[in-house]
Amino acid sequence: MTRQRQQILAVLAATRSHPSAEEVLAEVRRTLPGVSLGSIYRNLKRLREAGLVREIVTAEGRRYDAVTSPHPHFVCERCSRVYDLPEPVAAEALRRALPEGFAVSQIHLELKGTCPECGSLTS
Amino acid sequence: MTRQRQQILAVLAATRSHPSAEEVLAEVRRTLPGVSLGSIYRNLKRLREAGLVREIVTAEGRRYDAVTSPHPHFVCERCSRVYDLPEPVAAEALRRALPEGFAVSQIHLELKGTCPECGSLTS
DNA sequence: ATTAGTGCAAATTGTTTGCAGTGCC
DNA sequence: GGCACTGCAAACAATTTGCACTAAT
């Protein structure tokens, strides 16, 4: 666990904004100016494998999130912001509804639409 | 609606395998040998805008699907196959559980884990 | 000393675009 | 003739990788 890796995790833990790799880079550079994008990607991958970070793949790109509890997201179609939602539904019911032979490791629920910030805009 | 576009739609309608753009290309070329990848992407985009095709963004790439009814998917973490699931849960309940100001246009539910094909394998 | 991790730059992959030519109304 | 659509190739963006160097145990 190097300084870089710690910083990345710290940045992710400190925000609810689900930053992209580039955004993580910018933020980490505020304390470690020399870091490279390659290291960000490498560390995000390791952290993901370690189960400390989650990757959210949207049509607009990949975003990262320090793992707390599994929760669904709301993705704004206009501004691409990702919002956390409280755990809403019976994941258990879902699991039971599944055909025989499927082993579920994650449930990823994503709603798309427009967020309050964008909802009022005309175009 | 050109021949190419029709073929692409036909290919997607004829399979439940959720092909990638490359796979669509290969399939379409069986009847229209000259088609290019650029046209596949262009047409997939148009078809998507027309609401005839759905794009499924997974960590492993984008897959395409002729739209029938909205349904959730199961993505195998080992082989990346995408499976259709029957509409399982109260989308309405979800919508109601959402904080004020969010307008939902699509609900995308994705389960990850291992599928029956892969479940028995050791590594 | 060894081993993992780094910065940098080049390579790779997936997708989009510009352009000149085609085919259909 | 005009306009949308094509194939091709070049452009692009996001992510990964190879390499020589550095830091920590």
Image (cartoon, coloured by chain):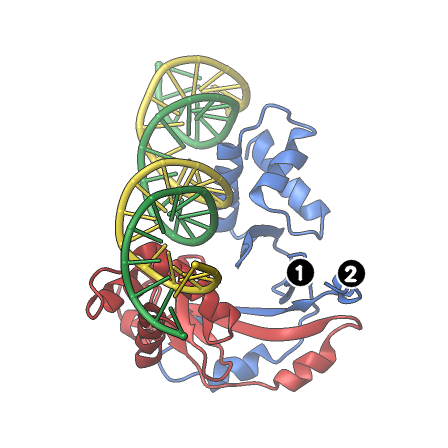
Chain colours: A red, B blue, C yellow, D green
Disc 1 packing (10 Å; few <14; some 14–19; many ≥20): some
Between B33 and A46, the one nearer to me in the picture: A46
Residue at horizontal 36 percent and vertical 59 percent from the top: A39
Label 2, on which residue? B117
Q: CA distance from mark 1 to mark 2?
A: 10 Å
Instruction: Tell me if residue B31 comes above or below residue A71 in the rendering.
Output: above
Task: Give the letter of the chain under mark 2.
Answer: B
Q: Do the residues indicated by labels 1 and 2 lie within the same chain of the protein?
A: yes
Q: Residue at x 55, y 84 (%)?
A: B93
Q: Is residue A92 rendered to the left or right of residue B48?
A: right
User: Which residue lies under the disc numbered 1?
Assistant: B78
Q: Is disc 2 surrounded by few (<14), some (14 to 19) or many (20+) residues within 10 Å?
A: few
SS assignment at label 1: loop
Amino acid type of the residue that numbered disc 1 sits on in the rendered structure: Arg
Query: Residue A60: x, y in percent?
Result: 40, 57
Q: Position of residue B26 (x, y in %)?
A: 64, 34
Q: Under tag 2, what secondary structure?
A: helix
Q: Is residue B103 something that shows in the picture?
A: no
Name the kind of residue labelled 2 in the image.
Answer: Glu
